[in-house]
Image (cartoon, rainbow, N blue to C red):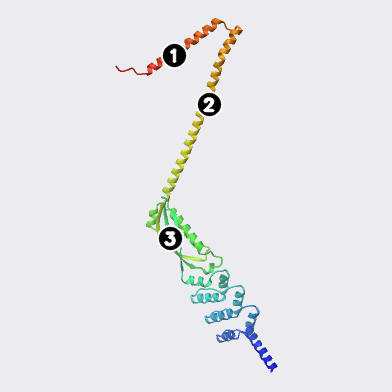
Amino acid sequence: MISSIFFLLMAIIFIALFLHFVPLRLWIAARAANVPLNIITLVGMRMRQVTPSKIVMPLIKANKAGLNVEVNQLEAHFLAGGNVDKVVDALIAAHRAQIPLPFERSAAIDLAGRDVLEAVQMSVNPKVIETPVVSAVAKNGIELKIKARVTVRANIDRLVGGAGEPTIIARVGEGIVTTVGSSESHNDVLANPDDISKTVLGKGLDAGTAFEILSIDIADVDVGRNIGAELQTDQAEADKRIAQAKAEERRAMAVAKEQEMKAYTQEMEAKVVEAQAEVPHALAEALRSGNMGVMDYYNLSNIKADTDMRDSISRSTGDSQLTPPAIK
């Protein structure tokens, strides 16, 4: 009895291990879909840490769609970290849309981090990218705020290594700014906004990107500020401040020069007073030493008195000439 239970347990364990390493359900499903797949291949997937369901189900899907995809290709892409199911879906979508897409290119696009299925769908149904508001200034100084819609289609051949949507948006914005900036007046842009589309579209902005630009449409144009007038106002204000600073500098220099002259005048007056204070001492010394007699001193005094009298008369005469006569 014990031996029978033991053998039963061993049989259950063996069957469980067998079913784990040999996914019979997937093998039966593959055989029923006429997919050439043997048990050894499924066991090998288990040994290589590959989930059989993530290989077998996409393989059945590809076979039903008429695609020639091998197990080794799917397994290698899975081991490389790719999304096998999405790659097969992209191949089926490209096959239905008659877009040439080999498995190797689809796998490379997937491993590059791009959504290969979305890329195929975008090749069939173009995508519209709306740019943010782009501010541009015409030559007359008027600002224009422009919003554009860019219709793009995925370029399968350039998905690996090609630039994405941010590059398209940046290039379109740059083209809008250049086109508006070369216009003489903002009225020209408002009158013919389609000229922006034609000019920007002719620049080949999709070069080196993963997209092909089909059209660029101007969605909205608004008139903004008068940038030219604001710049002129700012320049005039700056010139005014510079002129005021220079005037203040000249005034400060004049004040400093005036102070310097006053100091010089005071110094000279002090020297004159000092010299005048020495005259009596010099006269006294000359009298004591006999270099000048008493009569010489009196003559000098008379000359000084005569000079002072003449100065007094000349000042009084000048004042009377300046004073208007009284009206009788």
Quadrant of the rendered structure where residue 35 is? bottom right
Please give the label number shown on residue 122.
Answer: none
Q: CA–CA distance between discs 3 and 2?
A: 71 Å
Q: Residue at x 50, y 9 (%)?
A: 303
Image depth: mark 3 or mark 2 in front = 2
Q: x%, y% of residue 122?
A: 48, 70
- Give the structural element (helix, strand or loop) at label 2: helix
Given the image, on which type of amino acid does mark 1 rest? Ser
Whichever of callouts 3 and 1 sits on the residue coming sooner in the sequence is 3
Given the image, on which type of amino acid does mark 2 rest? Ala
Q: Residue at x 43, y 14 (%)?
A: 314
Given the image, on which type of amino acid does mark 3 rest? Lys
Q: Residues within 10 Å of mark 2 (few under 14, many from 20)?
A: few
Residue 286 seen = yes
Are discs 2 and 1 less than 8 Å apart at CB? Answer: no
Quadrant of the rendered structure where residue 84 is? bottom right
Q: Residues within 10 Å of mark 3 (few under 14, many from 20)?
A: some
Residue 204 seen = no
Q: CA–CA distance between discs 2 and 1?
A: 29 Å
Q: CA–CA distance between discs 3 and 1?
A: 92 Å
Please give the label number shown on residue 312.
Answer: 1
Q: Which residue is mark 3?
A: 147
The quadrant of the picture occupied by the C terminus is top left
Q: Which residue is mark 2?
A: 263
